[in-house]
Image (cartoon, grey):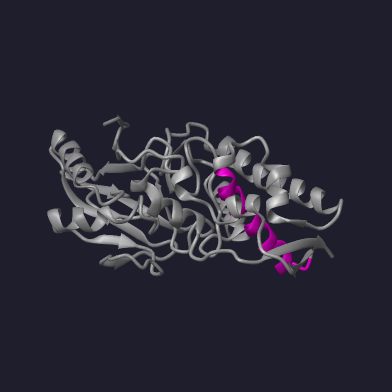
Amino acid sequence: MPRVKHTHIKRVRAANPSPMTLDGTNTYLIDAGDGRAIVIDPGPAMPEHIDAICAEADIDGWTIGAIAVTHGHPDHAPGARLLSERTKVPVYAHPEARFPHDRELADGERLVLGDIALQAIYAPGHARDHLVFWFGDERALFTGDVILGSGTVVIAPPGGDMRDYQATLDRLRREFPEARRIDGGHGESVEDPLAKLDEYIEHRKNREREIVAVLEEGPATISAIVERVYHAIPQPLWPAAARQVLAYFIALEREGRVRSRRLDRAPTSSEQTILNPDLSRIVDPSSRAVAAAELGIDRTVTTIEEYALR
């Protein structure tokens, strides 16, 4: 399995690639300096991945002393219980986490082990229980699904909130100007964190401007927005784009800039494809739970909303 080692950090990538997880989920091991290591995001409940994490620790003679999880999506959290059962060490998570964990880390609290400390930063937007971890010794941010090594992040209601996500990006940009690396939940390490944060911040603003520009021409449905604004991305990913558009509309409607009305009709066949996706077109069966969680798909859309500027 691909792995990378910095001064104190090793990465082990889970064998769960998909359009939603890129090359797979990144698990990180951090040397605590006393023969122990902290594991961040043990990933999916794949026994072979837990074996790989333990094998990487053994290479450097580390025992695992703590497990930290950025958020509860099924490609990041389920492996924590498996690893905890094997190592008999606690799992740390945000107080709102619904997956099994032993100890909670609120915003600003630190996980201390041996000679190091990880600061927990509450980072909602992608998920309500999301934490980012700051490792000051290496000036590294472990960002889970807030920032990825490539591409952008899905913000899908109900767990995702666009304004919370934008506030999280702004906070990271403001409070950690000294960061020299981002280690995200998927993809490669980012060696220019401030440039990446600026890219992410501007991307969200640009998408919103594009959506509003369509509405300036007249009312539109989510599917119509996707076809106009996201036409450059592969059509199998349009359902993910639709969830992003919904997140923007929820924010804009809450702010009084947009209004919605229910249309007296059922979805067309093309709208069905976008709003009620066949997940097998996006991911393989083993990744369906990840896709469903990432996209926030918990019910079938049976009516269509139209949105307009106020």
Horizontal side of 168 relative to 66 (left or right) equals right
Q: Which residues are magenta?
A: 237-256
**Was residue 103 drawn as part of the magenta stretch in this picture?**
no
* Residue 170 visible (yes or no): no
- By secondary structure, the bulk of the magenta-drawn segment is best described as helix
Above or below: residue 85 compared with residue 139: below
* Quarter of the image that includes the N terminus: top left
The residue nearer to you, when weighing 251 against 275, is 275
- Give the residue at x 36% y 68%: 98
Above or below: residue 94 compared with residue 176: below
**Was residue 254 drawn as part of the magenta stretch in this picture?**
yes
- Give the residue at x 20% y 39%: 52
Horizontal side of 75 relative to 251 (left or right) equals left
- Give the residue at x 40% y 45%: 136
How far across and how far down the image is residue 247, in percent? Answer: 63, 58
How far across and how far down the image is residue 232, in percent? Answer: 66, 35
The residue nearer to you, when weighing 237 against 13, is 237
Q: Residue 23 is drawn in which quadrant?
A: top left
How far across and how far down the image is residue 156, in percent? Answer: 55, 57
- Give the residue at x 13% y 54%: 86
